[in-house]
Image: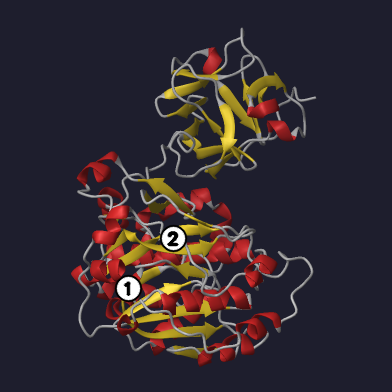
Amino acid sequence: VVSVPVVLNEAQYVESVQEQQDVFAQHAFNVHVSNLLRSDRSLPDTRHARCKDEEHQVAVHRTTSVVIAFYNEARSALLRTVVSVLNRTPADLIEEVILVDDFSDNEEDGTLLTSLPKVRLIRNQAREGLIRSRNLGAAEARGDYLMFLDSHCEVNVGWLEPLLDTVNKDETCIASPVIDVIDMDTFQYRASSSQLKGGFDWSLHFKWIPLSREQKSARRSPTQPFLSPAIAGGLFLISREWFYRLGMFDRGLHIWGAESLEISLKSWLCGGKVEVVPCSRIGHVFRKRHPYSFPSGNANTYLRNTKRIAEVWLGEHKRFFYEAQPTARSINCDSLQKQFQIKNELDCKPFQWYLENVFPELKLPNEENSAFGQLKQGSLCLQADGEGSEVRLVDCNESDPSQNSWAFSTHSSTIQHGKLCLTHYEHSKHPVLDTCKHSHTQKWSRHGRAVMLISSQLCLESGISWQVRMSDCRRGAVSQHWDFTVELQAQDDQPVNIT
């Protein structure tokens, strides 16, 4: 791949915009560091060594339209995204780079980039949101394939050919790259694991999950693509025709949130599939907050979007979504007629088929369990290493099964981790995991956010060095506040003996 000369005064384009003094305020990443980096900076090759020897079948005379929607993006990040595509992609594979400006405050953010090769610009006349903006870009695309990218990405060497090879073998496949991490503060580029697939919980929150033993053993090579229940975010390749047949992204989804889950479910249930392609690597700046506003608020917008997905695609299983997200019942998600029409026209399968054949890891909630998932205290999660081990707090990691398998049963008053139970013996301050015996040492109750051992009336508490211990219950003690990631029942007030 030959570098494309940037026919743009890069320094002038980046520096002509006055950024706020707080480098994180406007874009939720360190814009000062971003501005110091060249648009054509080099990246570490994070692919498996065998990827370099792979031969990829790419259809002749078929091209890709890259669609990048943006709103008030940092110019340096947007430019680096576009230049990485132009510099690391064979020119004959790229039809165009379509920038969709979602009514940014400064229209020159986009217009100045049209001097770059193959760049086309669409500017919305009002704020549409990133989801509808991607649809608008796709509707204007001339390429046979659509590649959706966020506006703060950098594609790595050899990124497109493996994706094209995968979709070329099955035109109903959505192909996702491995998404590497670009640090939001330092902009250091770091490799991500290539053995994680996308999933979600009954709240319809995306989560990474490890490949099953069956999937690992079935793979002939670490470079072989693997099936995934869902894709992460807005980075994937899809046949333009298949995207159109699926009805594109649901036009009723607002601004941002859950669109990748919607397109994944639609593809799987309506005759397609989703694969992760390990030899394709794209870096993405992961931020801790959204830098732009949502008309109805971030949480309400996401809840409304996920409600639309649950109503259309979960069928009878949507009750588990409402048990996990009870406030969604009162949210108006507008007409779903068009989505049900697509579902009927494509003769899509029921969600039960998806649970059995695509995502068996998504277990139906035990009717006795009122809460399950991770047992959290802020950004820390309860973890144990097996029978007899003391529980402790560690940084939360949604893909770690030693963290996300907790369940509280109102019927048996137990907190289980797989086949083991949270246990506290009087001779120790620290609770452990032990074989479930239905003993008084394993009977717990929940009151508000407190977790109390019924027999001793002591509460589960975090201590120094991330230890977990039993202590007298204290009203309002943050160290005694615990939350499951999925709550199916409201909790009682604080226990009567809290001081």
Secondary element at image label 2: loop
**Residue drawn at 30 percent across, 68 percent down:** 163
Depth check: give the residue in front, 180 or 360: 180
Secondary element at image label 1: strand
Q: Quadrant of residue 262?
A: bottom left
Q: In which quarter of the image is residue 446?
A: top right
In the rendered view, does 138 fall on the left or right side of 329? left
Q: Is residue 250 visible?
A: no
Percent position of residue 466, x then y: 64, 29
Residue with the mark numbered 2: 232
**Residue drawn at 57 percent across, 73 percent down:** 38
Percent position of residue 16, x then y: 71, 84
Depth check: give the residue in front, 104 or 452: 104
Q: In the rendered image of this protein, does residue 121 appear above or below residue 166?
A: below
The color scheme shown is secondary structure
Query: What number is the disc on residue 238?
Result: 1
In the rendered view, does 203 fall on the left or right side of 108? left
Near mark 2 (Cα within 10 A), the count class, few <14, some 14-19 or many ≥20, is many
Total marks drawn? 2
Quarter that holds the C terminus: top right
